[in-house]
Image (cartoon, rainbow, N blue to C red):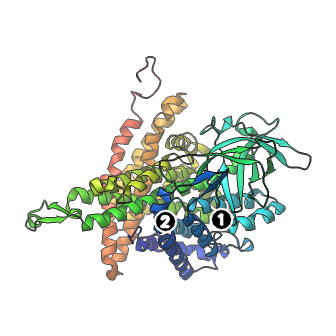
Amino acid sequence: MTKLFSRETIDFLLNEVIEVEQLLHWNYFNAHSSETFAMTLDNATKISQRIMQANYVSSDRHPPVLENGSVSVHAGIHTFVKAYADSGLLSATFPFEWGGQQLPKTVNAAVEFICMCGHNSFIMFTDLMVGCANLILTYGDEAQKQQFLPQLLSGQWGGTMCLTEPQAGSALSEITTMAVPQADGTYKIRGQKIFISAGDHDVTDNIIHLVLARIEGAPRGTKGISLFMVPAPKPPMGANDVKSIGVIHKMGQKATPALHLGFGQENNCTGYLLGEPNQGLSQMFQMMNGARLGVGLTGIAIASAAYHTSLQYAQERVQGKGLSAKLAEKGSVAIKQHPDVRRMLLTQKVITEGTLAFIMQCYYYMDLLKVCQTEEERMKYDALLELLTPVAKTYGAEMGNVSVNQGLQVLGGYGYSEDFTLEQMARDVRIMSIYEGTTGIQSQALLGRQIVKNKGFALQIWKEEVEKDVTKAFLTPELSAYGEKLKEALGKFDQVTRELLSIAAAGDNEAFLADATLYMEFFGILNVAWQWLRIGVVSQQNLSTMSEKSGFYDSKIHAMKFYFTYELSKIDYLAKVVVNKERLTTVAETEILF
């Protein structure tokens, strides 16, 4: 079976770069140890290889089927959900009182990464269960928690997020699904939702739909949206007037059904208010932000699978003579010896490992937010997460696409065929730039809200975090030059940000946000360069004390240098374009798109 991830790299990031064991000092996490973390990752590896990877191709070839009003899915999904729940991974991050293990989300991110390397679509079923359970745990009353949490966290019931409607995608203020209050405190739900992942299936007996809707008489826009729990039990449990109108036929991630759902077509769909009226969108953001980190992680998991698949191919495929005189004498060589192929492989490696480190750092901030003791700390970690979540989602998605494309190119014509899984990975990863807020929407949110929020508080504390590691690089003679490069890059980013803010202050909002996506790319590159500098410093320091792993650490330092040379250098172009006075994408008096 093809290797799809590096367990050694995952352990290195967790234990040596992030130093996740520091969390064990807090009471909430102190039931764990390095041994329990390792056992958890071992368990995830078995599930990933034996169930998920084994069903990756067949579940793509045999997508879900809607027949007689119900959806059936690939048998491998049934096996996965049961194994994931029975192993305790499904409820692992939840409190002991709800059957969880209080596992740090940083470690759980590694679990999900390992699993998604094997199959990026299966885990959507369990992630939605977890997301629904988290929202109910946060906003539900005691009766709702007792009714829903045990079933969701045992894998007996499924879950969904029902936001999008045919006329309301990114603009959720335009949703029209209605909720009519009833005398017993419930609501009658009526409306349609589309693109609902795992919206109907035969894996569980019941699915809890979390539905955004307007209570009759609620204010217009986002301030009038509430959140409802709408069960969709299967016979013989009963019914709740939730109909599967159609399965959407997708380019990729075919194993997970995407549904067009009708609620209350017979005026008999009961929903239960979760939390306060008219607070639904702000409540749902908890689940959406978790999902956004998950999308970035998924993009990089697919990139990892593509990298290791193309690396194995490049090691085995013999084609063409080497360019160096020494290799030319040997005749045909493995294609990994060709510099252009090595460039593509290294590009995949630095994107995958650097972005994984960045996303895991975001989860680490989430863990610190859980246990922090002061209001100052809470504000710090909350601000960092608000700032970095859209970046983790977007960079993981966009660069996941780039990385998988490079992997396919390494295989040449074989990459375009169904003989290898690269073509499937390319189809699967494409949606990540669209899921949970498109790249354009996330980029506008970053520049238009998070950068300017609280007078730039989040950006300032982020800079302080980065500067700590720049200082460590300055204290490491072999890497001080790279610390200087990142410091210079931070200076350019500051300058660009100031220029954009001056445009906003002048009232030209269109010009301010016109190239927000390029600003996002700039910021994403900086964040991953930051992580590579951290990786480089730790690797350099460990070279002198752990000589038996010198090859591993040397490879990380080489990869860091590659990222700084081939990726960080892109900021010079971005810095010029983002503040270019000649705005070529803003609305012109003469139509040019013809």
> Please, what is the three-letter code of the amino acid marked with disc 2?
Asn
Q: Give the left or right position of residue 280, taking residue 383 as reference.
A: right
Q: Secondary structure at mark 2?
A: helix
* Quadrant where the N terminus is found in the figure: bottom left
Residue 545 position (above or below residue 420)? below
Q: Give the left or right position of residue 269, taking residue 55 as reference.
A: right
The residue labelled by disc 2 is 55
Q: Residue furthest right?
A: 183
Q: Give the left or right position of residue 454, taking residue 325 as reference.
A: right
Q: Residue at x 27, y 54 (%)?
A: 412
Task: Judge depth for marks 2 and 1 and give the one in front.
Answer: 2
Q: Secondary structure at mark 1?
A: helix
The residue labelled by disc 1 is 370
Camera-side residue of 410 and 145: 410
Image coordinates for residue 43, horizontal then vertical, percent: 54, 76
First along the sequence among labels 2 and 1:
2
> Please, what is the three-letter code of the amino acid marked with disc 1?
Lys
Image coordinates for residue 72, horizontal then vertical, percent: 61, 57
Camera-side residue of 427 and 571: 427
Q: Give the left or right position of residue 577, taking residue 507 as reference.
A: left
Crowding around mark 2 (Cα neighbors within 10 Å: few <14, some 14 to 19, many 20+) is: many
Distance between mark 2 and mark 1 Cα atoms: 36 Å
**Circle number at residue 143:** none
Q: Residue at x 43, y 41 (%)?
A: 518
Q: Quadrant of residue 176?
A: top right
